[in-house]
Amino acid sequence: MLSPTFLVLILVIGLPILLGIRQSFYTTGGLDAQGFAIEGDQFNGLKNYTAIFHGATADRFWNAFYVTTLFTVVCVVIETVIGTAMALIMNRAFKGRSLIRASILIPWAIPTVVSAVLWKWIFNANGVANDVLGNQILWSTDGIQAQMAVIIADTWKTAPFIGLLVLAGLQVIPEEVYEAAKIDGSSTWNSFLHITLPLVKPALLVAVLFRMLQTLAMFDLPYVLVGKGKPSVETLSILAQQESVNTRYGPAAAYAVLLFLYLVLLAYAFIKLLGADVIGDAAPKRAKVKGQKRSKVGRSVAKGDMP
């Protein structure tokens, strides 16, 4: 029954990954010892990988690695805070709540390229951003202002995604829990720390994990918003794409493989260290264990072993 799904996954995910890994061990074109063009791919072992960490290529790689990590950390932290705040607001009962929930979906529903073009108009030299700030900032030039533009645009678009997932987690928390805490004298802040956060943690961790993986592979937003050839916003995905455009498919595949390994390691560490329940099997296991404990207590009471 599962074989059709596994077949599709192998064809659209597994096979491209294997072909990409294979391509990273080859080089395309070039000249031989006599100066004639070499046709087809030539096997060169680990040279594409070793070349990444030497000379000017190493400087460009580590810059792209730093920019990718910077965007991931800053964007995910800001989006988590804003998305959680959105979820708390949308979870409250007030007039027009349905309209607010629908409007928050709009930025997330807009395609990333379209969103990047819209923000490019806003961050234009004569755009709305400079008019509001009352200053002439060249957002599309290389520098920290370009990084800020990418972070703002990415937060605007994807914070609602985290908000929706956290909202789904909030809606399964029984209202009676908060009422009991209020009767016991718990403040709103204490209820948030000791009730809301622990109970919404599974949904929040999954949302953060998905956003972390998406941001690590960021390409289209900085490419369209700021442009290529800008070291301050050049991510690993942009670096791999530029190598591919210049027909250096072997080095491009090597960059892609390194990015893939980076994604896998971070995802594994995130799941192991923070306990993100990605496949949804932790809750049934806990419920089963609790059920077993209750059954033992019930048997003890029935036997008269407990007062």
Image (cartoon, rainbow, N blue to C red):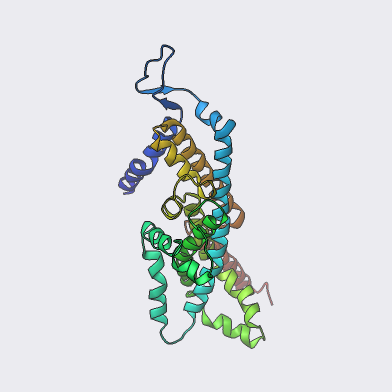
Farthest residue to the right: give it. 307
Q: Is residue 184 left or right of residue 247?
A: right
**Residue at position x 44%, y 13% in the image:** 33
Residue 80 coordinates in the image, percent (x, y): 54, 65
Residue 43 coordinates in the image, percent (x, y): 44, 22
In the displayed structure, 272 sits above or below 156; it is above
Residue 59 coordinates in the image, percent (x, y): 58, 38
Residue 149 coordinates in the image, percent (x, y): 50, 60
Q: Is residue 206 visible?
A: no
In the displayed structure, 36 sits above or below 191; it is above
Q: Is residue 196 visible?
A: yes
Q: Nearer the viewer, residue 304 or 260?
A: 260
In the displayed structure, 307 sits above or below 294; it is below
In the displayed structure, 47 sits above or below 158; it is above
**Residue at position x 38%, y 43% in the image:** 13
Q: Nearer the viewer, residue 263 or 179?
A: 263
**Residue at position x 68%, y 74% in the image:** 306
Q: How many marks?
A: 0
